[in-house]
Amino acid sequence: MAESNVSAADILGASIKAKRRLEDDTRLDSGFIAATDQARVLAYYVNMLVKWNKAMNLVGPKSWDDIFHSLIIDSLHLADFLNDLDLPKSPVTLDLGAGAGLPGLPLRVVWQKGAYHLVESRQKRSIFMRTAMQMMKLPRTEVFQGRAEAIPQEVLPADLILSKAFMPWKELMPFVKPMLAETGRLVILSNDSAPTSAEIAECGYELESTMEYKAQKKTHYFWSLLPLS
């Protein structure tokens, strides 16, 4: 599974083209500090995703370039967004509906705070993520195969919950609230801008911050939401 067609140099070039350059980061664990090492690990993941995708239809894009510019780039921007939030030093993060490991696996290459749990109910996708993680050597990152409702109580409460198309936001907000710490955050990755403050308040949250960026001529959004006490 590990034969490589995409190189670290290809990934570095793609990140420059996408205007989110990989950079050396001393906050990361040994083996990830250098941008070239980040690119090497991302190249492994992209190559494996392209190969497995032919048989398992894990993601819509087929070429590595499309995968990077439409999917991986989300993770790189998300790292910047999370670094600007007032999170605990070692947050517990749940990534709901992790699928093929997006945004979580690329995110953990460049953002490695705390413990990160990829939650996925489908067996084949869980196997893919675990196989990728064996080579990526991501720190403090685990796969939980099962429904979100069955997350072990010893993992909770979460300081951060991430959702990308896990369920509609009006259903998601009340669903995850019992899983969140009192000072926890729900971050939604969306193709739409955030709802109004009134709509969010009706679901028991307040909007903390947002971010938007362009990826392949489409605007992507992050919303950070705080539960109301």
Image (tube, helix red, strand yellow):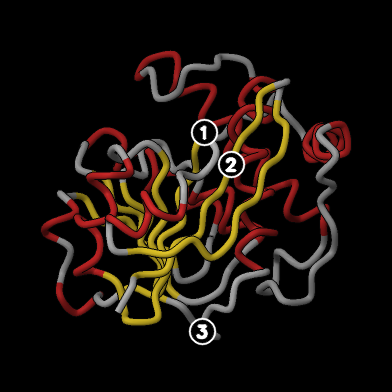
Residue 221, disc: 2
Task: First in sequence, mark 2 or 1: give its number.
Answer: 1
Q: Tell me, for residue 88, which label it has, or none.
A: 3
Residue 226 image-quadrant placement: bottom left
Secondary structure under the numbered disc 2 in the rendered image:
strand
Specify the amino acid type for callout 3: Pro
* Rendering coords of residue 157 (x, y %): 27, 77
- Eye-nearest disc, 3 or 1: 1
Q: Position of residue 42 (x, y in %)?
A: 65, 44
* Residue most extreme to the front: 198
Q: Is residue 12 left or right of residue 221?
A: right
Q: Is residue 96 above or below residue 229?
A: above
Residue drawn where x is 66% and y is 74% of the image: 29
**Residue furthest to the left:** 150
Q: Secondary structure at mark 3?
A: loop
Indicate the position of residue 99 as horizontal and vertical percent values: 36, 37
How far from the left and from the top, in percent, is residue 137? 54, 60
For mark 3, does the 10 Å Cα neighbourhood hold few (<14), some (14 to 19), or many (20 or more) residues? few
Q: Residue at x 27, y 49 (%)?
A: 172
| Callout in the foreground (3, 2) | 2
Q: Earlier in the sequence, mark 3 or mark 2?
A: 3
